[in-house]
Image (cartoon, rainbow, N blue to C red):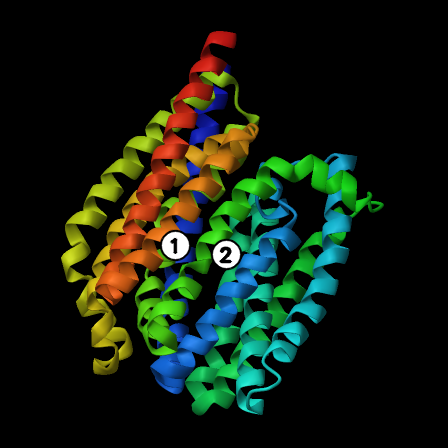
């Protein structure tokens, strides 16, 4: 009976993975189209402003996420989880109103157009974060088809204004609409699972390990700020245009993790190791394929953004290599998210990422945009080494305890 049950779980997991991967491929193509149109509407200079605002917004959101973006993937439905979700939702609704306004006030000395662009960018990333939690909630419940329907709907809402209209106004409308729609998706999906809110302090204490490790990944978004400080908004626009390839390139692994984490969380230690080894082999093959294809990535940049972004070609190659390194790190990080996150994990990640951002800044000073790309690879190598080393130690400990 155990073998039959394991086989059925494997088939279900494969089916969910196929649905999720298909949906995410379409969503990634739509997102690339959205960003390509945004880049064409704004140009490198204004794109740099938009990207820096988004980067700072994402870095601040790791606190407002409260670790729930990852916790919901475990699929827990006990009273404690319902109370945690209610507290998170209250915080997120408040943040959705405050963050964009704060962004606009920070640049209030600039033009009205710049203020609107910054506010729309922050609202967009806030809504994207909320929408991702909604998708995670559904993946944790193993409802992949509905999760992908919501994801694709969010992409269409963002695409329509920039496809139908032109100029910075189209970007502001698209960003605001997509941001508000993402928050609405979270409200609708989470409503059936809400309990009585717990105290914010209790929620933070419960999710501290996840918050810290997720926060380390979010702090990596400050690489755009580091590049801006050296190369200006023009350089940041070129760097960001190449950096946008990172998420689509990691699509396979990101999808796999959303499907696998609920399975790892509910598996026995023996089954967990078996599933993990199988997934890691697949990810390693994917990583090697990415590195082999990296020389072709400048062609993608030219096709997406036009000749005005040709200067981003060296960064595009580095981004592709960094995506491969990141994918291998993510599969090991998923193990911790499915079980528990020791304090050493976020501490090591923070250290590696901060050193990496320093490398991006230093190499940008020395070698310009190409140096920034190399620094990005250095940051991902350091992070991957830290995560894998810790996984080896804790996985071995679990094996001995069993």
Q: Residue furthest right?
A: 196
Question: Spatial distance from mark 2 to mark 1, Cα to Cα?
Answer: 9 Å
Q: Is residue 387 visible to us here?
A: yes
Kindly indicate whether the residue at mark 1 contacts the one at mark 2 (C-beta within 8 angstroms): yes
Q: Residue at x 43, y 48 (%)?
A: 354
Question: Residue 22 — which label?
Answer: 1
Q: Name the mark on residue 148.
A: 2
146 or 345: nearer the eye? 345
Q: Badge 2: few (under 14), some or many (20 or more) residues near its Cα, within 10 Å?
A: many
Q: Based on the displayed image, in which of its 4 quarters is residue 235 positioned?
A: bottom left
Where is residue 234, by image quadrant?
Answer: bottom left
Looking at the image, which residue is at 53% across and 82% down?
117
Q: Is residue 263 visible?
A: no
Relative to residue 323, is residue 192 drawn left or right? Answer: right
> Considering the numbered disc 2 on the image, is that residue within a helix, a strand or a loop?
helix
Label 1's element? helix
Residue 34 is left or right of residue 346, and the answer is left
Relative image position of residue 282 (x, y in whole percent): 29, 36
| In-image side of 166 versus 246 (left or right) | right
């Amino acid at each position: 009976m155990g073998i039959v049950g394991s086989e059925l779980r494997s088939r279900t997991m494969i089916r969910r993975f196929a649905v999720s991967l298909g949906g995410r491929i379409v969503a990634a193509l739509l997102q690339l189209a959205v960003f390509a149109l945004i880049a064409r509407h704004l140009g490198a200079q204004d794109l740099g402003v938009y990207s820096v605002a988004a980067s700072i917004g994402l870095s601040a959101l790791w606190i407002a996420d409260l670790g729930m973006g990852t916790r919901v993937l475990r699929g827990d439905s006990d009273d404690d989880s319902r109370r945690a979700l209610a507290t998170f939702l209250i915080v997120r609704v408040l943040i959705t109103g405050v963050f964009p306004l704060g962004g606009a006030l920070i640049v209030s000395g600039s033009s009205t157009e710049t203020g609107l662009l910054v506010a729309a960018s922050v609202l967009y990333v806030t809504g994207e974060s909320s929408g991702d939690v909604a998708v995670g909630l559904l993946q944790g419940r193993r409802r992949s088809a509905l999760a992908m329907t919501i994801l694709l709907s969010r992409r269409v809402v963002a695409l329509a204004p920039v496809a139908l209209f032109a100029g910075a106004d189209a970007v502001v409308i698209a960003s605001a609409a997509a941001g508000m729609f993402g928050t609405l998706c979270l409200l609708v999906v989470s409503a059936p699972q809400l309990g009585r809110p717990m105290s914010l302090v209790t929620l933070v204490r419960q999710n501290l390990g996840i918050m810290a490790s997720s926060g380390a990944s979010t702090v990596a978004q400050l690489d755009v700020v580091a590049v801006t400080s050296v190369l200006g908004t023009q350089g940041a626009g070129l760097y960001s245009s190449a950096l946008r390839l990172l998420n689509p390139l990691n699509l396979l692994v990101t999808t796999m993790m959303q499907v696998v984490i609920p399975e790892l969380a509910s598996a026995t230690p023996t089954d967990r190791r078996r599933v993990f080894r199988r997934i890691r082999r697949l990810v390693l093959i994917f990583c090697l394929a990415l590195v082999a294809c990296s020389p072709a990535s400048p062609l993608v940049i030219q096709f997406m953004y036009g000749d005005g972004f040709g200067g981003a070609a060296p960064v595009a190659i580095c981004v592709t290599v960094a995506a491969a390194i990141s994918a291998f790190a993510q599969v090991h990080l998923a193990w911790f998210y499915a079980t528990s996150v020791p304090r050493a994990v976020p501490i090591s990640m923070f250290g590696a990422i901060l050193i990496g951002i320093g490398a991006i800044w230093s190499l940008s000073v020395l070698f310009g945009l190409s140096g920034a790309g190399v620094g990005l690879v250095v940051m991902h190598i350091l992070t991957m080494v830290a995560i894998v080393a810790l996984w080896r130690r804790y996985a071995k400990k679990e094996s001995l305890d069993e």
